[in-house]
Image (cartoon, helix red, strand yellow):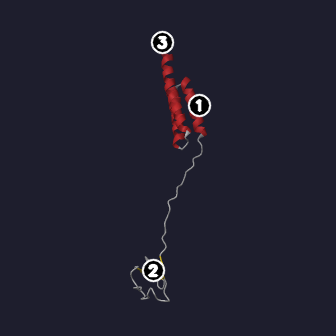
Amino acid sequence: MTFCASCGKEMQDEWNSCPSCGTTKGGVETTVFLAPKIIQQPTLIEILHPPQDGLIIGSYILAAISIIILPICFGPIAIILAAIASSRGDKRGITALIVAIACTIFGMILGVIVMSMLEL
């Protein structure tokens, strides 16, 4: 695609003169130039999340407490804290989530065993 240097109107490549002002391509006073091509490159934006140390440490502490005391209460809280840390981009959150689930299950099993021993 070319444009007339005299009037700036668009010209097709096979035309010898401008349909708007009549200036010829080969004329001394007229220069035909190509329109610049604008290419927009996609840019990658990396979102950095701050580490979720408080959530992960809290999850580990509550998971350890859920083994001994009230796993039905402390276990789900530990799981929720680990899930939040994981959803915010901290890769350690998945490990904390696995530990919280395992400690909760272990605490519940341990509670059932202790309660069955107390009934004897």
Q: Inspect the image, locate mark 3, and give the three-letter code of the amino acid beneath it.
A: Glu
Query: Circle 1 sits on which residue?
Result: 61
Query: Circle 3 sits on which residue?
Result: 119
| Residue located 58% across and 34% down the image | 58
Q: Inspect the image, locate mark 2, and give the three-letter code of the amino acid beneath it.
A: Phe
Secondary structure state at the residue bearing disc 2: strand
Q: Using the image, determine if residue 47 lies above or below residue 70.
A: below
Mark closer to the chain start, 2 or 1: 2
| Residue located 49% across and 17% down the image | 113
Secondary structure state at the residue bearing disc 1: helix
User: How busy is the neighbourhood of tag 2: few (under 14 within 10 Å), some, or many (20 plus)?
Assistant: some
Disc 3/disc 1 C-alpha distance (Å): 30 Å
Q: Quadrant of residue 89?
A: top right
Q: Inspect the image, locate mark 1, and give the three-letter code of the amino acid beneath it.
A: Ile
Q: Using the image, determine if residue 2 lies above or below residue 77.
A: below
User: How busy is the neighbourhood of tag 3: few (under 14 within 10 Å), some, or many (20 plus)?
Assistant: few
The numbered disc on residue 3 is 2
| Residue located 47% across and 77% down the image | 34
Disc 2/disc 1 C-alpha distance (Å): 72 Å
Q: Quadrant of residue 69?
A: top right
Res 86 seen here: yes
Please tell me how many numbered marks the rendered image carries: 3
User: How busy is the neighbourhood of tag 1: few (under 14 within 10 Å), some, or many (20 plus)?
Assistant: some
Q: Quadrant of residue 57?
A: top right
Res 77 seen here: no
Q: Using the image, determine if residue 46 lies above or below residue 51.
A: below
Q: Position of residue 28 (x, y in %)?
A: 49, 89
Q: Position of residue 51 (x, y in %)?
A: 59, 43
For the residues carrying marks 2 and 1, which lies nearer the camera in this image?
Answer: 2
